Image: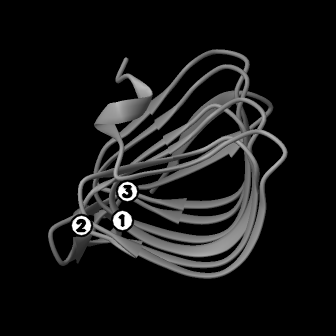
Amino acid sequence: MMSKDEFNAFLGTGTIYEGHLNFSGAVRIDGQFKGDIESDGTLILGKDAKVQATVHVGQLIVSGCITGEMKIAKKTIIHKTARLIGTLNTPVLVMEEGAVVQGTVNMLQGDAAIQSVGLVGELSEGKVELIE
């Protein structure tokens, strides 16, 4: 894990911010954020984070709660303490047991959606079922 001085910005526990966040490198949020987040870099949400946002980042690492529309260019990591609610578009998804995801997950490979292969995955009661 990175130390606090390796982040370009750090919103600590108790911090409340509303607006537009644009950054390069890595940003960690442990407080509350509402608005838009845009970056080619890495957004890290600590276990106390409460984020309600439209997110377009290179990599997303979630341990807290995030609600909104998320477009991730490279990879999404969802830890066991995380709650993710909304729409997630990501080419790579890593999720620990215990994480809560509610909404739609689209795993895109480049510009082609997985539907082009003829398979659609549906998550129901913790099982992934493939639908022809």
Image-based side of 44 in relation to 54, left or right: left
Between the C-alphas of marks 2 and 3, the distance is 30 Å
Image coordinates of residue 76 in percent, x first then y, are: 41, 44
Q: Which residue is mark 1?
A: 57
Label 3 SS: loop
Which of discs 3 and 1 lies nearer the camera? The answer is 1
Quarter of the image with the N terminus in it: top left
Amino acid residing under circle 1: Val
Residue furthest out toward the left: 110
In depth, the one of 31 and 117 nearer the eye is 31
Label 2 SS: loop
Amino acid residing under circle 3: Leu
Q: Earlier in the sequence, mark 2 or mark 3?
A: 2
- Tally the numbered discs: 3
Image coordinates of residue 104 in percent, x first then y, are: 63, 63
Q: In the image, which disc is placed on residue 4?
A: none
Seen in the picture, residue 112 relative to 20 is either above or below; the reply is above
Image coordinates of residue 102 in percent, x first then y, are: 77, 51
Seen in the picture, residue 77 relative to 79 is either above or below; the reply is below
Q: Which residue is mark 2?
A: 40
Image coordinates of residue 97 in percent, x first then y, are: 64, 15
In depth, the one of 77 and 91 nearer the eye is 77
Name the quadrant containing residue 3.
top left
Q: Residues within 10 Å of mark 1 (few under 14, many from 20)?
A: many
Seen in the picture, residue 104 relative to 64 is either above or below; the reply is below
Q: In the image, which disc is placed on residue 119?
A: 3
